[in-house]
Amino acid sequence: MNKRPEPSAGSGGGKLAAAAAPQAEPTPPAGRPWLRWVIVAAVVLALGYWIVGRSRAGATAAAGRGAGFGAMPVTAEAVRRADLNVTLVALGTVTPVRTVTLRSRVDGALDKIYFKEGQTVEAGAPIADLDPRPFQVQKMQAAAQLAKDTALLENARVDLQRFQTLLAEDSVAEQQVVTQAALVRQYEAALKVDQAQVESAALQLAYAHITAPLGGRIGLRAVDEGNIVHSSDANGIAVITQLRPITVLFAIPQDSVQAVLKNLADGDEMVVDAYDRDGRTKLAAGKLMTMDNQVDPATGTVRLRAVFPNADDALFPNQFVNVQLVVDRLEAVPAVSTAAVQHGTVGTYVYVVGADKKVALRKVEVGPSDRGLISISKGLAPGELVVVDGVDKLREGSTVELVGREAGGTPAAAGTTKRAWSGKRPDGSARPTGQ
């Protein structure tokens, strides 16, 4: 058998062997920076999708709990009977009973000031003195003229008596006696004028000493010592304002006038409370004093005046306050906290907690509110549980867990402080007189 000769290394067969050998893979081109950013973006998107999915799952779970898949924690309270005051709220202005501008009644130099600015003085307290010397001189002159005319009157009376004696003896003419009698009457009239001049001078001297016509607080001084003051000065020396008692002027709508008039006609003492501008802090308690006699056609309101003792000076002249006037009192009416009452497209409603711990939306009719409580005219009965906290998470039929509730489900009624009332109600029944 013939053998095929082996190709030598130097022959053409070497080229075929080299071609049959496996070739190395090509190296990928270096440097693709955009690829790494694509990878980072993909990771971020995947992470965001995962977070959103978790959030939706949590919301779905919460909705499931509210719809009955889990108990929703809420705070509830029982409907109770309470005494509520029917009040009218208005904006009022503190007005002093009396305000006096201290002016001098005579012209002169201001010699002495006895008060300090902002001081509280009593009626009759010394305020200031004017230079008294000009008025003392006038009084001396009037007294001297009085003495002179007194002497002339005495002399005229003596002459009249002498002439009357001579007339009886027919030694003097009757005309002379009549003339002398007229002269006596003339001096008597002059004497009265002189006496009036003396009294006038004494009065001017008294006016030089200025006293407080009423008790109150003195404002800032308008003039200093040494200045010439006049009775016609507009600003005077200072202004004194009575602070105790003090009044508040406020206005109520004309529709509420009859309720106020009815209480005034019955002789009831209507309670008025003054609160600060925010309506949170009670400043003073007083009573209604009087009502104006006409309606303001521009505003449709009627002005009222209330008086306050103001023993602690809580009210200050021209201060704005919120006024609450008690016009009636509701006794033992069903009431709940104002937080329990909701308002929506269905009207006014509350969530009532049933025995199975599920809530039911119930429409109610409400009445006046007072100090955090609101009266229920229709829709609830005393003892029923209503939700007061956590209402925004509830739906009809939601299962709840009571985490806040008064002991026994009957919290103590708030706002049962007795008001001072007298007389009788319109139906003839007696009103409470307070405690």
Image: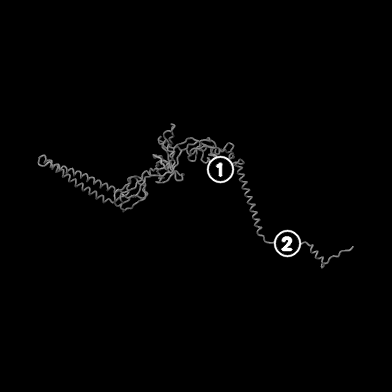
Residue 286 horizontal/vertical position (percent) = 41, 41
| Quadrant in which residue 426 is drawn | top left
Amino acid type shown at disc 1: Asp
Q: Name the residue carrying label 1.
A: 392
Please state, as top left, top right, bottom left or bottom right, where the C terminus lies in the image: top left
Q: Which of 245 and 92 is in front in this view?
A: 92
Q: What element carries label 1?
A: helix
Question: Which residue: 45% across, 46% down?
Answer: 277
Q: Which of marks 2 and 1 is nearer the N terminus?
A: 2
* Number of the label disc, if any, that sits on residue 26: 2
Extreme residue in the bottom direction: 10
- The answer to whether residue 392 shows anywhere in this view is yes
> Which amino acid type is marked by label 2?
Pro
**Residue 62, horizontal then vertical, whole percent:** 60, 44
Quadrant holding the N terminus: bottom right
Query: Where 263 sits versus 6, above or below?
Result: above
